[in-house]
Amino acid sequence: MAMAINYVSDINPSKESWKIIVRVTHLWYVPSYNNPSELQSIELVLMDEKGDKIQVSIKRSMIMTYRNLLNEGESYTLMTFELGSIVEIISRLHMHTRLIF
């Protein structure tokens, strides 16, 4: 059975399997604090067809997997990710959850 498509506003910790279709609206690289020539993470803002946004963090261990696959302005279907809490609230996103790869 095909997994139903969810919206960003549907995402919550109540289940583990999600499928969202989103566009990368912003993508930036965060350098390591101790060694600026190395990357600490890749950060993205994703937006679904309703205009809802969520921040995504790609950890250092996954950077090589995703670095050449994701482009700003492109759309993607995401199905495997963890949910994490945002410590500081990012007001322009109006979300208290972020996706982590």
Image: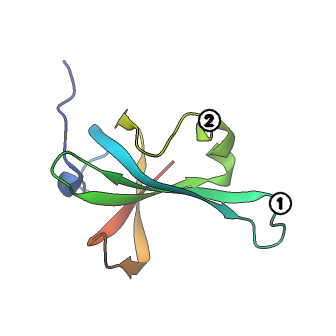
Mark identifier at residue 68: 2
The x and y percentages for residue 78 are 37, 37
Q: Which residue is drawn at 19% across and 45% down?
A: 49
Dot 1: element: loop
Is 78 on the left or on the right of 44, as rendered? left
How many numbered markers are drawn? 2
Q: Quadrant of the N terminus?
A: top left
Colouring of the image = rainbow
Q: Residue at x 21, y 28 (%)?
A: 3
Is residue 18 in view from this perspective? no
Q: Nearer the viewer, residue 85 or 67?
A: 67
Marks 2/1: CA–CA distance: 18 Å
Is 25 on the left or on the right of 94, as rendered? right
The x and y percentages for residue 101 are 51, 47
Mark identifier at residue 54: none
Mark identifier at residue 37: 1
Near mark 1 (Cα within 10 A), the count class, few <14, some 14-19 or many ≥20, is few
The x and y percentages for residue 25 are 39, 53
The amino acid marked with disc number 2 is Asn
Dot 2 or dot 1, earlier in sequence: 1
Near mark 2 (Cα within 10 A), the count class, few <14, some 14-19 or many ≥20, is few
Using the image, determine if residue 97 lies above or below residue 50: below
Dot 2: element: loop
Q: Which residue is drawn at 27% across and 40% down?
A: 20
Is residue 74 in view from this perspective? yes
The amino acid marked with disc number 1 is Ser
